[in-house]
Amino acid sequence: MAEAPDLAAELESAGVPVVEDGEENSLHTVDLQTPHNTAPTGPVLQFSDDAASPPPSANGEGGLEDRDPHSPVEGTRIETRQRSASKGTLLKEWGAHQIRVTKQLVSEKFGRGTRTVDPDLDKRIESLRETQRKYAQLMHLASQFHTQFVQVVETQKTLAEHFAFMSVRTPELHSEFQFNSDAQKQVSRNGETLLAAVNFFISNTQTVCTKTMEDTLQTVRVYENSRLAYDAYRNDLEELKKQANMSEKVAARLPVATGEFEVHKQVFEQLRHDLDIKLKLLDENKYKVTHKQLVLLLGAFAAYFSGNHTAVDSLLKELKAKLSQERQSQDPPAWLEELPSSRELHNQDQ
């Protein structure tokens, strides 16, 4: 400590203030900054908080804040990892489910697996499919009739125009051509009314066949998939119960298999109940709609033919009356009518 005064003197001569400690008589530097009026004589070392920060990690991210679980960045990382793990779990479960269902389907195709059968419901489902096929065939035939009858009506219109043209060009047959033209026009108008009725029938039949029935058949497909999954889990559970006494590992899987079976059983029973209600509602709706459409179509055909009969009969009577009047007021008979008959010629020869 004897050299302390000399060191203090040197520091004071260099312009650095020094404070003495009364207890230990040691020196403490209170300010290491260079005075404004004194130029630095050497390099100045600067220390900052960045020097104490950890180096960046290998992936380009570093710092204590990034490793903080409460920071937004670290929270996003954790959420992403959890989401990836959740997707992986779901994919694994989906794959196991598809393997079970495919195994059950193949077993049923080859007659080795057991399946749940509801005779009444299966019969109604098959009847629905057959009914849809019949309705589709009916709709196809009605569409063919509509297409062909459109051509008939167009031909009748063209024929009416040609009759009218011929009535003008042939004065001696004006009445005959004109009445035939009027008859074809009336029949074509009635035909257009019938076409509208047939088109309305096709539209409503298509709604019943392709929408109402198809919606119920979509529920049938979901029900059949549910039934297949239910049978797959039921058969697996039965196999596990048979092997439970042989292995503790298999016995430990029974609670999980039982829980999965109960879930699919509830889904299957709920879909079977929903399908039963849908089939009843479909039968009622199909009857009401089809009954109404058939009555309207029959009325349209009856009106078409009765209207045609009335119109043609009226025109025919009118034509006969007009021809009778024309015969009474017509010119002398033609030369062919004035020729003597063959009997008169024979008498003259005798």
Image (spheres, rainbow, N blue to C red):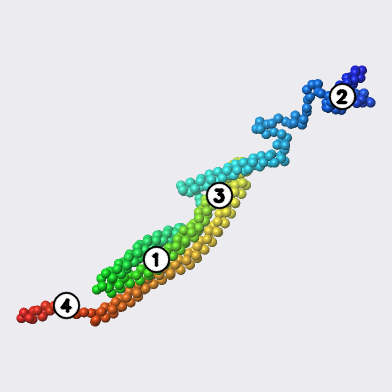
Query: Which is more toward the observer, 281 or 177?
Result: 177
Q: What is the secondary structure assignment of the residue under circle 4?
A: helix
Q: In which quarter of the image is residue 272?
A: bottom right
Whether label 1 touches label 3, CB < 8 Å: no
Q: Mark 2 points at which residue?
A: 16
Label of residue 337 in the image: 4
Q: Which of marks 2 and 1 is in front?
A: 2
Task: Specify whether 28 is left or right of 301.
Answer: right
Q: In which quarter of the image is residue 47?
A: top right
Q: Which of marks 2 and 3 is in front?
A: 2
Identify the mark nearer the N-term, 4 or 2.
2
Whether label 4 touches label 2, CB < 8 Å: no
- Residue plotted at (40% across, 60% down): 140
Task: Specify whether 265 is left or right of 20.
Answer: left
Q: What is the secondary structure assignment of the residue under circle 2?
A: loop
Identify the mark nearer the N-term, 1 or 4.
1
Mark 1–mark 3 distance (CA, rounded to whole Å): 56 Å
Mark 4–mark 2 distance (CA, rounded to whole Å): 160 Å
As drawn, 104 above or below 323:
above
Residue found at the far left of this picture: 350
- Residue plotted at (34% across, 70% down): 185
Mark 2–mark 1 distance (CA, rounded to whole Å): 115 Å
Label of residue 234 in the image: 3
Label of residue 195 in the image: 1
